[in-house]
Amino acid sequence: MKDFIYNEMMVHTALCTNKDPKKVLIVSDDATALVAEVQKHDGISCEAISANINALRDAKDGEFDVIISELESDAAVLAHYNRVLKDDGLLVSVHAPLDDLATNKVMMHVLGKYAKIIMPFNVGNGQTAILASKEYHPTADIILHRADMLDGLEYYNCDVHPAAFAMGNNIRKAYLGVIRN
């Protein structure tokens, strides 16, 4: 079971970055807590599928505004994510620990084919996720009224959101030219 910080950061960081999310796809073997976080937003529908490529193949092209994935993704999975995301969509995904430079650089290079912005961010307990966006920047385009008007949050707020993207110089140097912000 993931803690509340992780669940809130995975969901609300994405939903408060996308300008007008209407439909979210969660890829997880246990999406219950993530779905509950999405349901705190009015007017956003959510679909959850198991963390395997076969379930993703059935999704329609350009169907989703946001994908939240707990599936460590290879190039084929990332291509499917791109296919089912709208033109201004964004993906939040788990990835290898940041000190696994080789694995993450491969993932980020593939994401670079599809996304204008690729940034790791803190999701709690020393974990990071990747936000890959086709259009919206997670710190410049944060939807403040949406971030501040949510009820029932224990951690996430409009101050935590941009702070989650702050990375030390060691990460900046190691990922120079790979992270797109």
Image (spheres, rainbow, N blue to C red):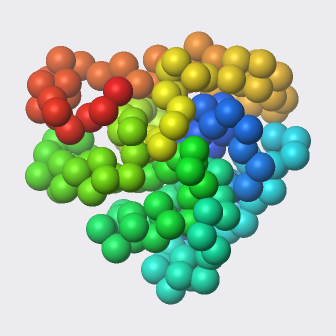
The image shows residue 75, relative to residue 86, as above or below, that is below
The image shows residue 33, relative to residue 7, as above or below, that is below
Using the image as rendered, state which of residue 164 and residue 173 is in the foreground: 173
In the rendered view, does 143 fall on the left or right side of 169?
A: right
Outermost residue on the top side: it is: 159
> Quadrant of the rendered structure where residue 25 is?
bottom right
Residue 162, given in percent of the width and then of the height, sits at 50, 19
Quadrant for the N terminus, please.
bottom right
In the rendered view, does 25 fall on the left or right side of 52?
A: right
Using the image as rendered, state which of residue 177 and residue 95 is in the foreground: 177
The image shows residue 54, relative to residue 134, as above or below, that is below
Residue 58, given in percent of the width and then of the height, sits at 60, 83
In the rendered view, does 100 fall on the left or right side of 67?
A: left
Quadrant for the C terminus, please.
top left
Outermost residue on the bottom side: it is: 54
Residue 56, given in percent of the width and then of the height, sits at 54, 77
Outermost residue on the right side: it is: 42
Q: How many marks?
A: 0
> Quadrant of the rendered structure where residue 171 is?
top left
Residue 5 seen in render: no
Residue 124, given in percent of the width and then of the height, sits at 46, 35
Which residue is located at x 47 percent, y 61 percent? 82
Which residue is located at x 45 percent, y 25 percent? 164
Using the image as rendered, state which of residue 79 and residue 157 is in the foreground: 79
Residue 37 seen in render: yes
Which residue is located at x 50 percent, y 86 percent? 54
Which residue is located at x 39 percent, y 36 percent? 117
